Amino acid sequence: MDTYSHGGIPNKSGRDPVLKDAKVLFIVGGPGSGKGTQCAKIVEKFGFCHLSSGDLLREEVASGSERGAKLKDVMARGELVSMDDVLQLMCDAMKKKISETKCFLIDGYPRELEQGTRFEKEIVPCVGVLYFDVSDETMTSRLLKRGETSGRVDDNEETIKKRLQTFHNQTKPVIDYYSQQDKVCKIPAEGSEKDIFAEVEKYVSSHKW
Ligand code: AP5
């Protein structure tokens, strides 16, 4: 029986041979915690490859595919899309970039514990987890402000509430799990983008890539 459920090539270890040497940082935090903003700065400074699960999903929606139409409804409700869909999109995107990068920033993933354990079993274990810690009030006000111009189906008051609930119920256990493995770097992220990046930079620079 195949050891993959997302369409990769099975091997004895259960991992994709193409991605076995990839280095991965998981980037987690609630909606509007600044994951994307800080990833852009890491890319600029360190040249890593940024893959956002939300962006990959929005690209699929924009493609007009049948799968995209289903994804759009789930995202508009602020819920999590199917793990198979997001893992497959992520794996395919990583394969396209593996020859160009020394480290992947996997942004907005894992959002539930099994996403993390499956990724590590089927692709590669993560080096660490960057967690942006921000209050619900700050995240809500950032997203409402962005919603004035973003055109995103989920940047509205009702969906933001649901996204926050989804984060607390489903993503917090991910942070607990990796904290027990001593893999989490928690960044207080209420301040300015510049101050937050100073902390991010210290963490990234402390690793050998
Ligand atoms: P996704 O696109 O990942 O959205 P999100 O995590 O809810 O939040 P954002 O990406 O919008 O925020 P961010 O933390 O990147 O903050 P940003 O830097 O943009 O996911 C959308 C949906 O897709 C999910 O709800 C789910 O349905 C689905 N999905 C995604 N991944 C999935 C997965 N793995 N499994 C299942 N389903 C999945 O900043 C936000 C705003 O704040 C910006 O306007 C920015 O300019 C501003 N800002 C940032 N930093 C600061 C600062 N320090 N001070 C002031 N303003 C700031």
Image (tube, grey):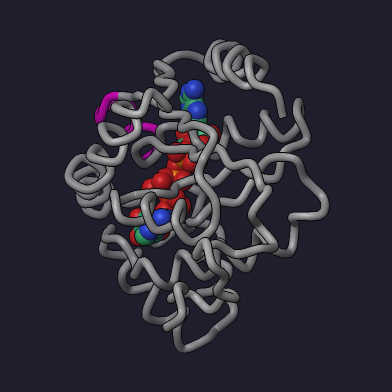
108 horizontally vs 89: left or right: left
Work out whether 118 lies above or below 189: below
152 horizontally vs 12: left or right: left
Q: Position of residue 197 (x, y in %)?
A: 59, 18
> For this rendering, which residue is in front, 57 or 136?
57
In the displayed image of the protein, which residue is found farthest to the front?
A: 12
User: Which residue shows up at 55% across the image and 39% down it?
Assistant: 36
User: Which residue shows up at 60% across the image and 64% down it?
Assistant: 16
In the image, is residue 106 part of the stretch drawn in magenta? Answer: no
Q: What is the quadrant of residue 182 in the picture? A: top left
What's drawn in magenta, residue-wise? 135-145
Q: Position of residue 203 (x, y in %)?
A: 57, 17
Q: From this viewpoint, is residue 116 visible?
A: yes
Q: Main secondary structure of the magenta part?
A: helix
Q: Position of residue 56 (x, y in %)?
A: 56, 62
30 horizontally vs 97: left or right: left
